[in-house]
Image (tube, rainbow, N blue to C red):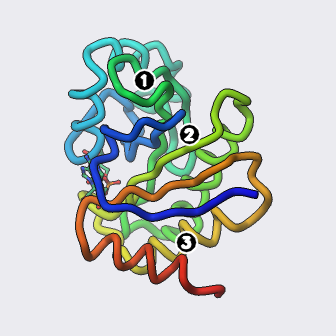
Amino acid sequence: MTTLTAVRGDLTEQAVDAIVNAANEWMLGGGGVDGAIHRAAGPELVEACRAVPEVRPGVRCPTGEARLTEGFALPARFVIHTVGPRYVMKEHAALLASAFRASLTLAADHPEIRVVAFPAISCGVFGYPVAEAARIAVRVARERAWDLDEIRFVLFGAAELAAFEAALGSRR
Ligand code: AR6
């Protein structure tokens, strides 16, 4: 049984097995939660990201996929880097579902990872409406029996938390 939870807080402070980074395809840091994760993890994180092979020039993690590194100075042992879509992209809903699914697949494939914490991927710089994103995130989290103890959504603001709580409270 995987427990789904939503809490208000700072993702970088979560003492979980893995936190998920809302990264970009280049995977060398950025603003938002990505910048906060890199600051908290220390400079070894960007070196670990640089070591992830490019699949094509400038792309280490295509939109909708995920890559794993250690967490270095973070309380979390691992960081799962995923790239959500910009809301203006075609197929944004399928790509956002894919980002959550790829992250959960990577987590469930690592027996050391039992608890994974997500931010509201795509809901900052990438402009995704949080209510829509929350419904997609919760649907994917419930999609199959992920071999995990807890999937935690960690939201920075009250409005984001309310959106995820509403999605968790709904069976649809
Ligand atoms: N803990 C939890 N949530 C946070 C934190 C934090 N410490 N900091 C921000 N958020 P964003 P995106 C929330 O912009 O939309 C970066 O430059 C924030 O309030 O971080 O996927 C990357 O390099 C928002 O609800 O990610 C990419 O280029 C959510 O995290 C691009 O931004 C996601 O906002 C990715 O954009």
Q: Disc 1 and disc 2: Cα gap in Å?
A: 15 Å
Q: Is residue 172 above or below residue 97?
A: below
* Residue 116 image-quadrant placement: top right
- Residue identifier under label 2: 66
Element carrying mark 3: helix
Q: 62 and 138: which one is in front?
A: 138
| Location of residue 74 in the rendering, given as x and y in whole percent from the top left corner | 35, 26
Whether the residue under disc 1 has CB within 8 Å of ligand 1? no
Q: Earlier in the sequence, mark 2 or mark 3?
A: 2
Residue 145, disc: none
Compared across the picture, whether 18 is left or right of 74 comes to right
Whether the residue under disc 3 has CB within 8 Å of ligand 1? no
Q: Residues within 10 Å of mark 1 (few under 14, many from 20)?
A: many
Q: 8 and 31: which one is in front?
A: 8
- Residue identifier under label 3: 136
Element carrying mark 1: loop
Q: Residue at x 55, y 53 (%)?
A: 99
Amino acid found under the numbered disc labelled 2: Ala
Amino acid found under the numbered disc labelled 3: Ile
Q: Is residue 163 above or below residue 8?
A: below
- Residue identifier under label 1: 71
Q: Residues within 10 Å of mark 3 (few under 14, many from 20)?
A: some
